[in-house]
Image (tube, rainbow, N blue to C red):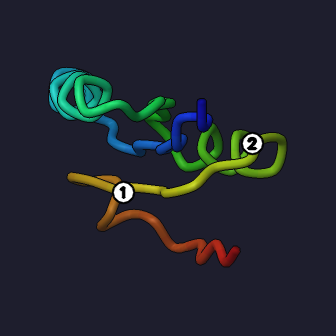
């Protein structure tokens, strides 16, 4: 069995991120949530992530570029 792909979802809006995470999980993905940039960067420096989604107001405030 292949491991599930891990998506880090960055969005300060808890309800919106929960709905999106639920939809992704029902399609077979593992999802980690971060509300702030600092949380996301800590996650990215300590764990492997296949995809990062930045949504809502977080996208407008995000100034750090993360490259794989």
User: How many other residues sit within 10 Å of disc 1, few (<14), some (14-19) or many (≥20)?
Assistant: many
Q: Quadrant of the C terminus?
A: bottom right
* Residue 18 location (% of width, % of height): 24, 22
Mark 1 residue element = strand
Which label number is shown at residue 42?
Answer: 2
Neighbours of disc 2 within 10 Å: few (<14), some (14-19), many (20+): few
Residue 44 appears left or right of 9? right
x%, y% of residue 26? Answer: 23, 24
Q: Looking at the picture, tell me which residue is in the foreground, 48 or 61.
A: 48
Q: Is residue 65 above or below residue 25?
A: below
Of label 1 and label 2, which has the lower sequence position?
2
Q: Is 8 or 34 nearer to us in this picture? A: 8
Q: Are marks 1 and 2 in contact (CB under 8 Å)?
A: no
Residue under the image location 64 percent in, 45 percent down: 38
Q: Specify whether 61 is left or right of 66.
A: left
Q: Position of residue 52 (x, y in %)?
A: 48, 56
Q: Is residue 15 above or below residue 36?
A: above
Report the residue at 60% width, 45% height from top.
40
Q: Residue at x 18, y 30 (%)?
A: 23
**Which disc, if any, is residue 21?**
none
Name the mark on residue 54: 1
Q: Is residue 61 left or right of residue 4?
A: left
Q: Residue placed farthest to the front in the image? A: 1
Q: Is residue 12 left or right of residue 2?
A: left
Q: Secondary structure at mark 2?
A: helix
Q: CA distance from mark 1 to mark 2?
A: 15 Å
Q: Quadrant of residue 53?
A: bottom left
Q: Based on the displayed image, in which of its 4 quarters is residue 64 positioned?
A: bottom right
For the point 27% across and 53% down, the residue is 55
């Amino acid at each position: 069995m292949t491991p599930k792909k891990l998506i880090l979802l960055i969005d300060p809006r808890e309800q919106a991120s929960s709905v999106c995470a639920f939809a992704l999980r029902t399609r077979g993905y593992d999802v980690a949530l971060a509300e702030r940039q600092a949380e996301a960067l800590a996650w990215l420096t300590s764990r492997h992530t296949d995809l990062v989604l930045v949504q809502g107001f977080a996208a407008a405030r995000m100034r750090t570029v993360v490259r794989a």
